[in-house]
Amino acid sequence: MNGLLSLLIFLPVVGTLVVLFVPREKSSVIKWVTTLFAGAEFLLSVPLWTFAGFRKSGDFFFRETRDWIPSLGAKYSLGVDGIAALLILLTTLLSFISVYASFSAITKREKEYYAFLLLLETGMVGVFCALDFFLFYVFWEVMLVPMYFLIGIWGGPRKLYAAIKFFLYTLAGSVVMLLAIIALYFFNTSGFLWWKGLGNLPTFDIVHFQTIASSIPGDLQLWLFWAFFIGFAIKVPMFPFHTWLPDAHVEAPTAGSVILAGVLLKMGTYGFLRFSLPLCPDALYSNARFLGLTTVGWVAALSIVGIVYGSMVAMVQKDMKKLVAYSSVAHLGFVMLGLFALNNAGIQGGILQSINHGLSTGGLFLLVGIVYERTHTRMIADYGGLSGVMPVYAMLFMVILLASIGLPLLNGFVGEFTILTGAFLADWRWAAWASLGVILGAAYMLWLYQRVFFGEMTQEKNKGLEDVNVREILTLAPLIAMCLWIGVYPKPFFEMTAKSAEKIVATVAAPGLRHAAREAAPRLAAVTPTGAPAAAAAAAAAAAAPAAVAEVK
Amino acid sequence: MKAVAILPWIPVFPLLGFLVNGLLYLVSHAKLGGKDAPKGPHGDAHGAAHGSAAHDDHGHGGGHADHHEIPFAAAHAVIGPAATILSCLAAFAAIFLWWGETHGHEGVVATMWTWMPMGANPTWFGGKAIAVDVAFRLDALSALMLGFVTFVGSLIHVYSVGYMGHDAGFGRYFSYLNLFMFAMLTLVLGASLPILFVGWEGVGLCSYLLIGYYWDKDFAADAGKKAFVVNRIGDFGFVLGIFGCFALFGTTDFGAMFSLAAADPGRYAAGGLLTAICVALFIGACGKSAQIPLYVWLPDAMAGPTPVSALIHAATMVTAGVYMVARCNVFYRISHEWALKTLGENATVWGLLTHDAAFIVAVVGGATALFAATMGLAQTDIKKVLAYSTVSQLGYMFLGCGALAFSAGIFHVFTHAWFKACLFLGAGSVIHALGGEQDMTKMGGLRKLVPHTFVTMFVATLAIAGVPGLAGFFSKDAILAETWGAGYKVLWALAVLTAGITAFYMFRLIRMTFYGTFRGTPEQLQHVHESPASMTGPLYVLAAGALLVGWMGIPKFLLGKENFFERFLEPVVPALAAGWRPEVHEMAHSTEFILMGSSVLIAFLGIFLAWTFYSGAYPFAMPERIATSLGGFYRLVRDKYRVDELYEAVFVNGLIKKGGRLLWEIDARVVDLIPNGAAGLAVGMSNISAWFDRTFVDGAVNGVGNTFQTAFRGMRRAQTGRTQNYALTMAVGIFGFVCLYLLLT
C-alpha cells in the first residue's frame, strides 16, 4: 500500500481547498464536505490498524522516500511504526469527531473554521509520519498555525492572550528543538562546534540518526537531550512549562480543546519516544547530576510533581474546562513517568495512556461543550442537580469520568496500572508518589460531578435544560466504545506498541546497565530481597557492563 | 460439564441484569434533546419533575411514587432478582462440580484472555514477560464466599422488590445492585490480585452510586463521595502491594505467587519487601473493610437505601478486605515467622509492630473492634448502631486473621453475613413500618405490631451477642481462643470486653425499638404495619442462618470431631517449607473451656445490663443519669470522638483545599512567570534595541538596522496578535537555518 501515508497527509488539505470553494452561505454543504473528508480520512487510516507488520516488528512500514531539497540532504521521507500508527488512528478519529461536534457550536465564519480544522489534521498526521527531521519540523510548525487561528478567532473572551501565549510558548520550544536538529545534522557531517563530525553525507534521515546514536559523545547527547526536552516538555506540557495549557484549553472552542488535549499534547510524548530516548540514551544516566538527580531522575521528578501538582490545582478550579485542563497536566505526568521508567511496561503504558487521555479527556471536553452550548457558562457553581433534567447526559459524563479516574475495565486503569508497574520496577518511590495522583484524581473528579449533577437544582434557569440529542450521543459513542474496548481487551493495543517499545528499551538498556553497575545497584538491593530479581539484575549488570562499555569504545 | 466451564458465566448474569435494567430505566426517563436548533433554557417546569421528586430512603416519606406509575416496574422487579438468582444457581452448580472433581483439595482456574501483557524487562526475572490474565479461580475460599454472596445477595434482591417498590428510581436501583453483584463476584473469583482489584474497585463504584442513590440530598452525595475517596486512599496501598508482588515474584497470580513463596519463604521474606507488601495490602483492606484509620466512611454510608446497607455495607463488600488478607495468608504467615526469626527471643511489641505484618493486622483489628463498639453505645439512629457494630465485627475478623487464625476470621465473615444482613433488613422493615423513622428514641413497643420482624431480629441479636449455640457464638469464640493461643493476651482481653459491649448495645437496640411504649407520633402508630412477605421471607431465611450456620464450625474440644469449617479451608492455607511452620500450641481442654466460659459470661453480663438499664415505660432514666455523670466523656463518645471533624479540618480543608489554592496562586504568580517573564524580557530587549537603533545606528547602516528593527518590532508586536508576524518568524527561522548551513559547510 505504497502512498497510503501521503494520501493520509494530503487528503485533508484537498478538503481544505474544496471547502474554500464552497460559497460561504451554504453552511450545511461546508459542514458535510468537511465531515466527508474527515470521515474518509479516518476510514483510510484503518488499514494501519489491520496491518499485521506492526505486531511482528518495530520497524518502520509504509515507507516512502523522495528527494526534496537535495542540497541540504532533506528528503520527503515517510514511514510509521506501531506507535506512530496508533497515534495517527487517534488523530483521525478525534478529528472526525471534532468536526461532527462543531456543527452547532460554531456559528460564525464556518468556512474558515472547517478549512483550518482540516489543515490542522494534515499537520498532525504529517508529524507522526515524517522520518526526516526537516520534514518533521515543517509539519510541526504547520500544525501551529491553524490551531492558533482556531483559538484566536473562535475562542472565548481571552482568546487573543491564550492564542498568542500558546503560539509563542510552543514556538520558543521548537526553536530550541531546531537547534538540536541542526547540531545533529552538523555532527553527522562536518562537526558541530568542538565536536568532531562523523563525515557522513548530509542528511536529515531520522532512521540514520538512530543508527549513529551510539557514536554521539556523551556530553553532546546531554546537550541534545535537554534541547529536545525543552521543545517537547513545553508541548506535553510538563511542569513547570504547563501554564499555556489551561489558558489555551479554556479559551479554545470545544473542538480545539479536543484536538489540543487529544493529539497536540501527544506530539510532545511522541517526540520523547522518537528522538530523546533513541538518540540520547547515554544522557539518560549521565554522571552529570544536578541536585543529586540524574537526567532520568529529573524527568521522573518533574512528572511526579506534575501529577500531584496538577491534581491539587485541579481540585480548586471553579471553571470546568480549567479543571479538565489541569487534570491533563496530571495525566500527562503519568505518561511521562511511564516513558522514563525505561522498561517495557512503562513505555507501553505511557503510549497507551497517551491514547487513553486523548479519548477520555477529549470526551470530557466534548461533554463540557454540550452544556456550555446550552447555558454559555462553564462555571461549576452555575450548575447543580443536572441529573434530574439530563439523565442520559449524566450517565455519559459518569462513564467518561470513570475512564478518566482509572476505574478498572475502562481504559484509564489499564494505562495507569501498566505505567505504575513499570515505574515501580524502575524505582518503587516513583510509583508510591505517583499513586497519590490516583487518590487526588478521584477526589477532584467526583467533587466536580457532585457539584454539577447532584444536590437540589438551585438554578431556576437550568430546569428547562434539554438532555443530549442524538448527534451529541453519536459524537460520544465512539469514545465510550473505545474506552470500554481498551479497558476490557487492550491486548491488540499492547501488540501494536510492543515491538517498538522493545526496540527503545534495547537502546537504553546498555547505558542503564552501565549505570547500575556504577551504582553497584544499592537501590535495587534496598527494595528487593536477595531473591532472584535483584540477584539477576546485579549479575546481568555486572556481566553486561564491561561489554557495553567496550562496545561504545 | 466441568466447573471451569461455568465459572465465567457466574458474573455474566448480573452484568446482563445491569445492562437491561439500566437501559430500560434510561429509555423510560430520557427525554433526548431535539434538533440542534433551539438551545438554552426555556422554562419547562416539567423538566425537573421526576428528577427531584422521588428520593428518600424513608420509602414512605418524600419518595412516594404511588401516584405516578413507575415505568417497567414489573420488568425491573423480575429482571433484578432473577439475574442474581440465576447467578446463584450457576455458582452452586460450579461449586458442586468442583467438589466432585477435586473434593475441595485444589483450586480450578478458568483463564479467559490476556488482559495486560506488559512485556519482558531485560534485567528482571530472567527476561520473563509480566502479564495479567483475566482468570477466575474456584477453591475452598472462593467457593465459600461465592456461596453466601450469591445466596444472601438473592435474598436481598427479593427483599428490595418490596422495600423499594414505591421508589421512582426503582430501575436505577436494580441496575446498580446487579452491577454490584457482578463486581463482587469478580472480586471473589479473581485468580490474581489485579482481577481481585477489578472487582474491588467495581464494588467501590457501586457503593458510591448506591450510597449517593438519593443524589438530590446533599448528605447522601457527600457520603458517597467520601466512601469512594477514603477507599481510594486504601487502594493506594493496595496497588503498591500489587506492584510489590510484580517486583518480588514477577507474577500476581495467586497460585503461582503462593507456591513460590511457600516453597522458599526465606528467600522472599529477607529484605522486608514481603512484609511491606503485606502492610500495603492491609492498608487497602483498611479502606474497604473500614478499619482504623479509614473507617469513617462506613457510618456515613448508611445514607443509602437499607437493603444496600445490608448487602454491601454489612454482609459482602466490607468483608472483602478480610477475604483479601485471608487470601494472601501465605504472605502474612511468612512475615510473622520471619519477624520471629529476626527478632529472636526478645521480641518486643514495638519490634513486632515494625517487623510483623500479621501483628499489625491483629492490633488494628482489635483496636477497631473496641473503638467502634464504644461508639455504637451512644448512637440513637438504628442504622448507625448497626453500622458501628459492623465496623467492630470487622475488627474481630481482622483480629482473627492477625492471630493467623484465617479460618476463624473467615468463619466470622460467614456467620456475620447472616446475622448482620438479618439485622439490617429487620431495621429496614422497622423503618418501612414507621414511614421512614430511624431514630430509636421515637420507637418502642413494636414487638406486637411487627411480630415477624421482631422475632427474626431477636434471633440475629442473640447470634451477634454471642449467646451459645447461635452462629456468632462459635465464630467469635474461635477468634478469641486463637488470639489467646497466639499469646496476644491484651488483645484477647480487649476482644472479650468488646464482646460484652456488643451484647449491651445490641440489646439496647432491641429494648429501645421493640419494648416499652411507642414514642412516635399517633399518625405513625396508626400506619404501623408488618412488611409484605417479600420482605419477611428473606428475614426468616437469614434468621435461620443466624441460628444454624455456626454449627459448621464447632470446635474439636466440644464434640471431639474435626472442625468442619477449618478442614474445608485447609487447602487455601498451604503448608510452608520446613523450618517455617509455626509451632502449634495445643491448648489444654480446660483452658479452652475457661476461655469459652468467660466470653459467655461477659455476653450475658452485657445483655443483663442492657435489659435492666433500658427497662420501664420511659427507658431512658438510668442511661441519662449515667450520661450526665460522665459529662464530657459521654459527649465525646456520642460525637464519635470527633474524628470526622479532625479529618475534615486537617485533610480536606487543610491539606487538599488550602494546599490546592496555594499551589494555584503559585501557578498564576510564579510558574507563569516563565512565559510572561520571557515575553516581558523580549519586549524590553526589543525596546532597548529599538532605542539603540534610533540613537546610534540611525540611518547610517540602514540595511542591517532595518532588518533588526523589523525583526524586533515583530517580536514586540507578537504581544498584540498580528498574525503575519508568525509567518515572518518562521521565515526567519528557516533563513537562519540555511545561513548556518552555508556558514558552516
Image: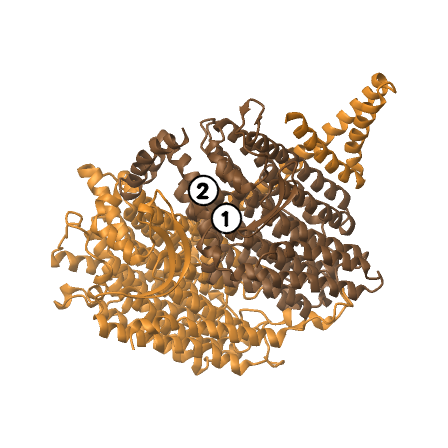
Q: Which chain is orange?
A: B
Residue B636 in the image, given as x and y percentages of width and height: 45, 49
Disc 1 residue type? Gly
The residue nearer to you, when weighing A469 against B79, is A469
* Residue receiving disc 2: A341
Q: Tally the marks.
A: 2
| Crowding near the residue tagged with mark 2, few <14, some 14–19, many ≥20 C-alpha atoms within 10 Å | many
The residue nearer to you, when weighing A222 against B308, is A222
Element type at mark 2: loop
Q: Residue at x 41, y 79 (%)?
A: B536
- Quadrant in which the N terminus of chain A appears: bottom right
In the picture as drawn, the residue positioned furthest to the top comes out as B696
The residue nearer to you, when weighing A254 against B467, is A254
Q: Residue at x 62, y 74 (%)?
A: B29
* Alpha carbon distance from label 1 to label 2: 9 Å
Residue A305 in the image, given as x and y percentages of width and height: 53, 39
Image quadrant assignment for residue A540: top left
Labelled disc at residue A350: 1
Q: Which chain is brown?
A: A
A475 vs B38, left or right, is: left
Residue A343 can be seen, yes or no: yes
B150 vs B27, left or right, is: left
Q: Residue at x 35, y 67 (%)?
A: B417
Disc 2 residue type? Ala
- Quadrant in which the C terminus of chain A appears: top left
Residue A250 in the image, given as x and y percentages of width and height: 69, 49
Q: What's the colour scheme?
A: by chain
Looking at the image, residue B731 lies above or below residue B445: above
C-beta proximity under 8 Å, tags 1 and 2: yes
Residue A312 can be seen, yes or no: no
